[in-house]
Amino acid sequence: MQQSVAEIRRLIARHKFWDYAFAIVGMICLMVGILVLLSLFADLARTGAPRLTPAFFTSFPSRMAEEAGILSAWVGSVLVMVVTACAAVPLGVAAAIYLEEYAPKNWMTAIIEINVTNLAGVPSIVYGLLALGLFVYILGFGQSILSAGLTLALLILPVVIVATRESLRAVPGSIREAAYALGATRWQMVSDHVLPYSSAGIMTGIIMGLSRAIGETAPIITIGALTFIAFLPNSPISPEFPFVNAKWLMDPFTVMPIQMFNWTSRPEEEFQLNAAAAGVVLLAMTLAMNAVAIYLRYRIRKKIKW
Amino acid sequence: MSASVQATLKAEAKDLNFYYGDFKALKGISIPVHDKKITALIGPSGCGKSTFLRCFNRMHDLYPGNRYEGEITLNPDNVNILSPKVDPIEVRMRISMVFQKPNPFPKSIFENVAYGLRVRGINKRSVLEEKVEVALQNAALWNEVKDRLHDLAFNLSGGQQQRLCIARALAIDPEIMLFDEPTSALDPIATASIEELMDELKDRFTILIVTHNMQQAARVSDFTAFMYLGEVVEYNDTKKIFTNPDKQQTEDYITGRFG
Ligand SMILES: Nc1ncnc2c1ncn2[C@@H]1O[C@H](COP(=O)(O)OP(=O)(O)O)[C@@H](O)[C@H]1O
Ligand SMILES: [Mg+2]
């Protein structure tokens, strides 16, 4: 029995109704999410705008809201991020290379793999507690930039490992075989080919990790960051040879989210403006990092397409 | 048999078995590979041609669970290249390979060809430049790319990419070159240029080529092995195989009655 053309058309019309219906529902859901975020951001920006002056970036926190700034906070954030990157990148990338290219595929590595993925979901305060014991007391780094950087490095290590492994896996087997067939050792294959070809993805993973770390508050409070700091750590650069020094690693510090937290918990209305302004700066830092990640991915992907 | 049989022996498979885990993919293969000749492996898809070819550069060592039995001896030193005592990297430095799908590195044309040399510790610019040029000339690609050696290899056409892969395999002066259906991903014109190229290479290199295109085997090779279900049914002079094979099964295959 054949359907008539009219019947077929009716059928299509009915199917298409649901097509349109979902498109509209989906669009509304998307808009709710985006509009809420955008209005929050706009509100933050509007509230903070009067405080976003150059002086805000060059002043220490103060008892007077109008004079208070984020100098110690952004310097602290930058220095902590440097430590985090220096620790998490080599550790994470090396671990990922080992797991992906070297480790034999057996139940041991399977368990390690599952746990690395699970570690990404551990609440950050748990890392804070762990770090308090390990870095602050056992290793004696104290409540320092070093402790904070290492704590956040631990926190983002799973993210870096997972992102790196995914990028390594994206390099096709035919490229690996091409390198091996020319007599390359495993390390030559990895360092001359797989690693450079997956660098965009690895870099993206690192930046995603860092942009998560820069906003973390709980673990940093746990290890004892100060909420009010009116001085800078020692400068990492010194005028005499060898031009760098490591004293800053052991200095007390504060970071952007903690400075914000400190201001929001003040009773004075005035300080809320500072908190909003610091929030805008923090968001801008995160967005800028993500923009760099997207740019890198775009640039390198354009060159390498399998 | 004809005069070409008097060629010297470059390598020889002796009673070779190969296993992917429990699956026996090659069963008692014994054929010679003559020096400065082209030996073709033909047979229906899945009969083990690639598996056999990839024994010659120990490619199977890259994956767990694979196992060789028997020997492939390589002359002049008469070493069994399948022996666990022989480092697969050493084997791959002596025997190079061109794959089914062109697989250039996402690097420049120059760096693609130079890579095998770099692996051998040759990093001097002048030496690299000279060897890369010779290899590209041997692969009949030089004239097309000499003005853009530092362009990305991905910008070349499929046929050019495959010739680049041939140049890459040639640059290291291999004792044997393995080709695994090198033209199956190419159009007829690119295929013709690769076949022409092989014809030029055969006086200087020992070549082992897998093809499921019988005309190709007939056109380019000196010797042919017909494989079926992991065994070599017949190994003979190419002319003999295609005009008057010894085995009925070979005749059925080349006349298109099966496969
Ligand atoms: N990696 C592998 N693991 C298990 N079996 C394989 C693998 N590769 C090939 N085989 C099997 O080995 C046989 C020969 O395969 P192959 O050498 O690729 O054939 P051909 O190149 O002649 O088409 C086939 O039955 C195929 O299914
Ligand atoms: Mg094959």
Image (cartoon, rainbow, N blue to C red):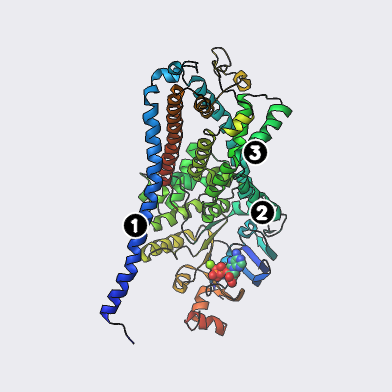
The numbered mark at residue A110 is 2
Q: Which amino acid does label 3 sit on?
A: Val
How many residues crowd around disc 1 within 10 Å: few (fewer than 14), some, or many (20 or more)?
few
Cα distance, mark 2 to mark 3?
Answer: 24 Å
Front in this rendered view, residue A43 or B24: A43
Residue A279 x, y percent position in the rendering: 45, 30
Instruction: Describe the element under mark 2 as helix, strand or loop.
Output: helix
Q: In this view, does B176 lie to the left or right of A130?
A: left
Q: Which of marks 2 and 3 is nearer the N terminus?
A: 2
Which image quarter is the N terminus of chain B in? bottom right
Q: Mark 3 points at which residue?
A: A126
Binning the other alpha carbons within 10 Å of mark 3 as few (below 14), some (14 to 19) or many (20 upward) gives: some
Q: Up-down: is A141 above or below B166?
A: above
Do we see residue B7 in this rendering? no
Pair 2/3: label in front: 3
Determine the residue located farthest toward the left in the rendered image.
A6
Q: Which residue, given by chain and number where applicable, does mark 1 sit on?
A: A24
Image side of residue A277 versus residue B247, left or right: left
Would residue B247 be found to the left or right of residue B255 on screen? right
